Image (cartoon, rainbow, N blue to C red):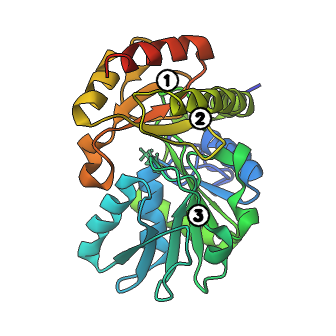
Amino acid sequence: MEAPLDRSTIWPYEDGEPGPFYYARAGHPNGVAAERALGELEGGEAVLFASGTAATTAVALALLEPGKTIALADDAYYGTGVTLAELGRWGLRHVLFDQTAPPPEAADLVWIESPSNPLLTVPDFEAAAAHSSPVICDATASTPIHLRALERGCDLVVHSATKYLAGHHDALLGVVVCRRAEDAERLRAFRNATGAVAGPDAAWLLLRGLRTLEVRVLRQTETAQALAERLGSHPAVTNVRYPGFGGLLSFDVAGGDAARRVETGTELIANATSLGGVSSTIETRFRWEGTRVPPGLLRLSVGLEPLEELWTDLRRVLARA
Ligand SMILES: *Cc1c(COP(=O)(O)O)cnc(C)c1O
């Protein structure tokens, strides 16, 4: 059974001294329970944040300092570049690199993503791990079911737990899982000092979601594999990107107008952003990312609907793309 939801922000001192929980910003039972479960899944020490973006910000600000440089995979999640650009005002630099090749020497942190969202490239883990600086992997789209990045030589793993880990499009969360206990300690201190704490309701929903993570992700993978194959031989589809695992794929149609007809025409698949939920979502990414992606690119996050119903929905809109 799930531990009961505890929304307390305070817990009485014990004999005049703070116990394990005393003020919710410093720590709360549902958050700690979720961190324990995530730590086991990734094989490290987990620190929970209010969103994936808050987790990214915490890593950059807590583990680096002004003048340091992050080497960021050039096709990493669009928002990661936005966050790092924002932090540039405070003297943190970032450079882009091709994550299928070795990272640039002059970097104080290497930031890879597996597979990248939405171009679905997989990093060269060996080349990243051979770098002299720490390596962080955004494993949001893999989940720990398909990737344990700490075992592939990474020092830190970050997830938008909003996506597959919580899994139901109803909780906003992020997590950093650390190989070294001192990094987790530093991130917890930074989180308490800056306040980007995940609330107990979201942490409870995350734990609930983790109970079905494996069955969800395996089923989503099976359906996504079949859809990637069928899309690959559809005449209206010019390109399919699928790494062979996971529930996320992207494909291209003739151009922006055709892509818009597809995303606005599906009935079962919601035209919405985000990914990793039990219900499928589709969107063009050009609207957010501009020329980083082809205008005809559609990102599809495969949910738990039956394969044939999803294919019927896609085939119907592709016929008029
Ligand atoms: C959504 C996402 C993020 C950002 O997470 P939020 O929870 O939305 O802040 C980071 N990385 C990847 C790969 C994502 O898909």
Q: Name which quarter of the figure residue 128 lies in.
A: bottom right
Count residues near mark 3 (Cα–Cα under 10 Å), then give few for <14, some for 14-19, many for 20+: many
Q: Position of residue 320 (x, y in %)?
A: 32, 17
**Mark toward the start of the polypeptide (3 vs 1):** 3
Relative to residue 250, is residue 14 depicted above or below?
below
User: Which residue in the structure is indicated by mark 3?
Assistant: 123
| Callout 3: SS | loop
Count residues near mark 2 (Cα–Cα under 10 Å), then give few for <14, some for 14-19, many for 20+: many
**Mark toward the start of the polypeptide (3 vs 2):** 3
Residue type indicated by callout 3: Pro
**Mark toward the start of the polypeptide (2 vs 1):** 2
Point 51% across, 88% down: residue? 105
Q: Position of residue 157 (x, y in %)?
A: 61, 60
User: Which residue in the structure is indicated by mark 1?
Assistant: 280
Q: Nearer the viewer, residue 280 or 200?
A: 280
Point 56% across, 71% down: residue? 186
Residue type indicated by callout 1: Ser
In 3D space, how far apart are the residues under numbered discs 2 and 1 (Cα atoms)?
A: 9 Å
In 3D space, how far apart are the residues under numbered discs 3 and 2 (Cα atoms)?
A: 18 Å
Q: Is mark 2 within 8 Å of ligand 1?
A: no
User: Which residue in the structure is indicated by mark 2?
Assistant: 247
Quadrant the C terminus occupies: top left
Q: Is mark 3 within 8 Å of ligand 1?
A: no
Point 50% across, 53% down: residue? 116
Q: From the image, state whether disc 3 or disc 1 is nearer to you.
A: 3
